[in-house]
């Protein structure tokens, strides 16, 4: 994963990114020194925290729309095709002796698979989880076949993609992730209203003149980007959890959609920071640890949600019945 | 219907074609000889009717009579097999000024997603077509408050939509249409899942809106409610059996003719839309014994 990924055309922006990532590294190192945090002595930990922090923003950002469209499985499907993408990259490299980063082929293959999922469901009218199951199986089968065709070097290298590895997050990988992060956040910010409308009420969105299939495709393409981004530390197998678990946790306590979006980002950040720290401390795999922390957070939120709704019932018992003819009353806004 | 022959035209052409204040603009929905089917058998056949500005039209008919399909056609969600459909002077399919139409879908109690979203956020969606990719402004939020005030939901603005009753949800969806400054309100079976008390209040609200100039087109299974509130009744069972005032409808035999064909096996067949391959025309008695399937 060295030079060939970076062509001359992107040299200047890459240098800028690398410089910024360097700054981040220096800052974390300074924090580590000041507070005597040993794990911040290592550059790969700086990268892990950077990449983890970015994933914890963009995964829930996209995942919130997916989960509430009952499309939580799509992350899983795309993660498996991203695995095929990795296999393609490694296969081509070993065949032609090139040095393309497997992450680049993973991005490409996952985005193609994302569009395939949408296309299959549009053409066959099959419900979406059928098309997802097909794409998932195809992706994993393709990856497995490509690996078996070239056992030896290839099979050894594949583990880090399956299970993720903090130490594999090079500066170059971090730069790729920063780019993905920028693209995903900008696109979601610009199309937030449209995505929300389509998520909440597809028919009304069509009546309102939105191009629903187009936004569906956009959604899946963004998912593919997030999946590949998260693959570096989570590993293929656990990637989907990052899209779903923090979102499900936030949905337990949030009232509004924007609130749920922000809460899921905060919860994901907690899972990532605590997870990475624990995995460093106990030398456990980062992906699994992050997911377990996220699930613990989810369980906590379920309990908090139950308590909250019990409180709401008590406090609402009067308000809801009176709500219908509450026209005359003054503004109850905060 | 002078533009009838024009095939679907781009947005630009639609803009220049905008009818403004002249004659055609008063016809909000114009359906001519419309035929459509999901499969080979037509769900609606040779249907013609118009809705003028300020009308309050209720479409009634048995289950599977094509009522909801007719609404979807009028809104441009399906392409007619034959005939034409125009919305605010433009072909429904090519209609671009979407914010002028407010739509309330069928069965909001069942279909409202269990996702965290507040009433205010739902109503704000009415402003989205106006805002495009731009930011939601203060005046957008002001309109949302105003719409909530109109439907009497001001105090529930920060509630989760899933925490509301069926009737309150319907009001929220109407507020969304109001916030979007819709001129035409289209409702598909709005009272399904709404308790009787709220149904009355709900129709009062529609009448109030209609008095203030809102054009209303609704599909409803509750015949009594339509006869009581709407200013015009369309009775549909694949074709139009009646189109006129509620009083005239009560005196006619249209109800028996339209529903009589369905008293047999088809009752309790909620989506029997593609289930009757054999034509129903002139087959009034024969239907009672055998079901189309």
Image (spheres, rainbow, N blue to C red):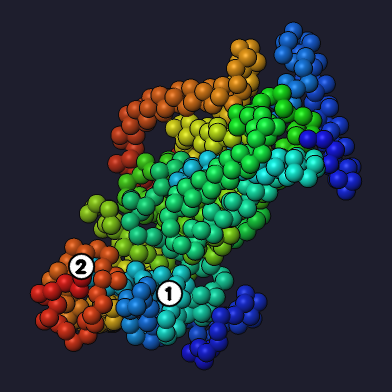
- Mark 2 or mark 1: which comes first in sequence? 1
Mark 1 chain: B
Mark number for residue A243? none
**Front position in the image: B185 or A245:** A245
**Front position in the image: B60 or A21:** A21
Circle 2: element type: helix
Q: Dots 2 and 1: beta carbons under 8 Å?
A: no
The quarter of the rendered structure image containing the C terminus of chain B is bottom left
In the rendered image, which residue does mark 2 sit on? Answer: B224
In this rendering, the answer to whether A138 lies above or below B244 is above
In the rendered image, which residue does mark 1 sit on? Answer: B74
Query: Label 1: how many residues lie within 10 Å, few (<14), some (14-19) or many (20+)?
Result: many
Q: Position of residue A70 (x, y in %)?
A: 45, 46
- Label 2 vs label 1: CA separation? 24 Å
Q: Position of residue B106 (x, y in %)?
A: 35, 60
Q: Residue at x 71, y 40 (%)?
A: A90
Q: Residue at x 27, y 53 (%)?
A: B193
């Amino acid at each position: 994963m060295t030079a060939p990924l970076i062509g001359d055309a992107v040299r200047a922006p890459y240098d800028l990114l690398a410089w910024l990532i360097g700054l981040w590294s220096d800052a974390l190192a300074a924090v580590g020194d000041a507070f005597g945090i040993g794990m911040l002595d290592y550059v790969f930990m700086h990268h892990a925290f950077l990449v983890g922090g970015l994933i914890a923003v963009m995964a829930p950002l996209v995942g919130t729309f997916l989960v509430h469209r009952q499309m939580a499985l799509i992350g899983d499907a795309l993660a498996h095709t991203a695995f095929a993408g990795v296999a393609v990259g490694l296969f081509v490299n070993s065949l032609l002796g090139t040095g393309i980063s497997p992450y680049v082929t993973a991005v490409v293959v996952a985005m193609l698979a994302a569009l395939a999922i949408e296309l299959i469901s549009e053409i066959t009218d099959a419900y979406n989880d059928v098309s997802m199951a097909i794409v998932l199986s195809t992706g994993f089968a393709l990856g497995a076949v490509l690996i078996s065709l070239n056992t030896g070097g290839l099979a050894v290298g594949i583990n880090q993609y399956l299970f993720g590895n903090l130490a594999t997050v090079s500066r170059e990988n971090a730069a790729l992730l920063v780019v993905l992060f920028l693209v995903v956040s900008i696109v979601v910010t610009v199309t937030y209203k449209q995505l929300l409308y389509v998520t909440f009420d597809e028919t009304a969105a069509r009546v309102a003149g939105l191009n629903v299939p187009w936004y569906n495709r956009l959604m899946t393409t963004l998912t593919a980007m997030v999946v590949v981004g998260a693959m570096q530390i989570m590993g293929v197998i656990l990637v989907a959890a990052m899209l779903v678990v923090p979102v499900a946790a936030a949905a337990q306590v949030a009232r509004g959609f924007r609130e749920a979006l922000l809460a899921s980002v905060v919860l994901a950040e907690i899972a990532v920071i605590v997870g990475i720290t624990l995995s460093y401390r106990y030398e456990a795999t980062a992906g699994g640890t992050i997911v377990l922390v996220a699930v613990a957070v989810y369980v906590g939120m379920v309990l908090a949600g139950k308590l909250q709704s019990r409180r709401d019932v008590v406090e609402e018992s009067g308000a809801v019945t009176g709500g219908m003819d509450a026209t005359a009353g003054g503004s109850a806004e905060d | 219907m002078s533009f009838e022959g024009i095939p679907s035209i781009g947005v630009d052409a639609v803009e220049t074609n905008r009818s403004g204040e002249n004659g055609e603009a008063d016809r909000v929905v114009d359906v001519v000889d419309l035929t459509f089917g999901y499969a080979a058998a037509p769900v609606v056949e040779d249907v013609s009717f118009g809705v003028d500005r300020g009308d309050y039209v209720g479409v009634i008919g048995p289950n599977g009579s094509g009522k909801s399909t007719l609404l979807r056609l009028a809104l441009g969600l399906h392409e007619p097999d034959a005939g034409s459909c125009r919305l605010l002077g433009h072909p429904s399919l090519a209609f671009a000024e979407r914010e002028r139409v407010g739509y309330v879908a069928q069965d909001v109690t069942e279909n409202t997603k269990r996702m965290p979203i507040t009433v205010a956020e739902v109503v704000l969606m009415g402003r989205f077509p106006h805002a495009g990719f731009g930011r939601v402004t203060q005046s957008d939020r002001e309109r949302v408050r105003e719409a909530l005030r109109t439907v009497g939901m001001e105090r529930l603005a920060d509630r989760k939509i899933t925490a509301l009753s069926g009737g309150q949800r319907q009001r929220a969806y109407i507020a969304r249409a109001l916030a979007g400054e819709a001129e035409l309100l289209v409702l598909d079976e709005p009272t399904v899942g709404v308790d009787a008390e709220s149904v009355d209040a709900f129709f009062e609200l529609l009448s109030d809106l209609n008095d203030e100039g809102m054009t209303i087109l609704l599909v409803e299974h509750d015949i009594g409610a339509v006869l009581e509130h709407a200013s015009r009744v369309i009775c549909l069972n694949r074709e139009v059996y009646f189109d006129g005032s509620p009083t005239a409808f009560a005196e006619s035999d249209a109800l028996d003719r339209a529903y009589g064909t369905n008293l047999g096996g088809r009752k309790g067949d909620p989506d029997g839309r593609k289930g009757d391959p054999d034509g129903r025309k002139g087959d009034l008695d024969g239907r009672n014994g055998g079901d189309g399937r």
